[in-house]
Amino acid sequence: MLTLAAGKALTHLGHHIGPNSIWKFERLALLAPPVDFFLHPGALQSVDTQIYLRNGVKDKVTPPSKALLLKQIFEKQGQINLLLDEEAGHFSYMDELPPQIEDAQPNRKVFLANLARDIAQFVTA
């Protein structure tokens, strides 16, 4: 989603990844995003949208420290709201878990319902 919103993603080898077109979003909700692709200078400078970022405290794939880096980048542009979910892991935000993945979320159904409500409120605000 960040690449669609004008973010410039690079692999560790420096290869550009993402679409060739840019969409104008008013609001963008990101759930445990792949932050490492956007840590190079100027990667997110062209992203001009309000961002709602959620990350799980128990996320081992995209740890909270990476979400905090993204927050610092977007805070300079004044357009981010970060929420760290205490009992969430990386896959907690998926409707269906990948095979053999156990969710850290103790009440998955309630968590997903609240997540959907919160995102809907953000995008329609």
Image (cartoon, grey):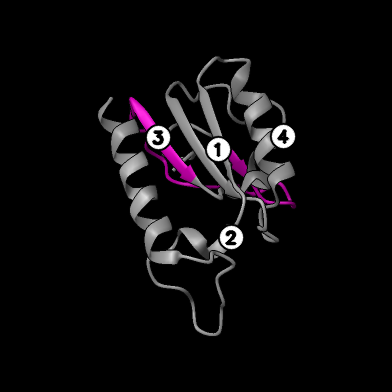
Task: Identify the residue under disc 4.
Answer: 40
Left or right side of 73 for 121: left
Q: Quadrant of the C terminus?
A: top left
Q: Give the quadrant of residue 101.
A: bottom right
Q: Amino acid at mark 3?
A: Leu
Q: Earlier in the sequence, mark 3 or mark 2?
A: 3
For the residues marked 3 and 2, what is the alpha-carbon distance in whole angstroms? 19 Å
In the rendered view, tell whether residue 76 sits above or below residue 84. above
Q: Earlier in the sequence, mark 2 or mark 4?
A: 4
Region rendered in magenta? 8-30
Left or right side of 103 for 49: left
Q: Give the quadrant of residue 28.
A: top left
Q: Amino acid at mark 1?
A: Leu
Instruction: Mark 3 vs mark 1: give the one in front.
Output: 1
Q: Position of residue 4 (x, y in %)?
A: 41, 39
- The residue nearer to you, when weighing 124 against 20, is 124
Left or right side of 35 for 114: left
Task: Identify the residue under disc 1.
Answer: 83
- Element assignment for label 1: strand
Mark 1, Cα crowd under 10 Å, few <14 / some 14-19 / many 20+, is: some
Q: Residue at x 36, y 40 (%)?
A: 118
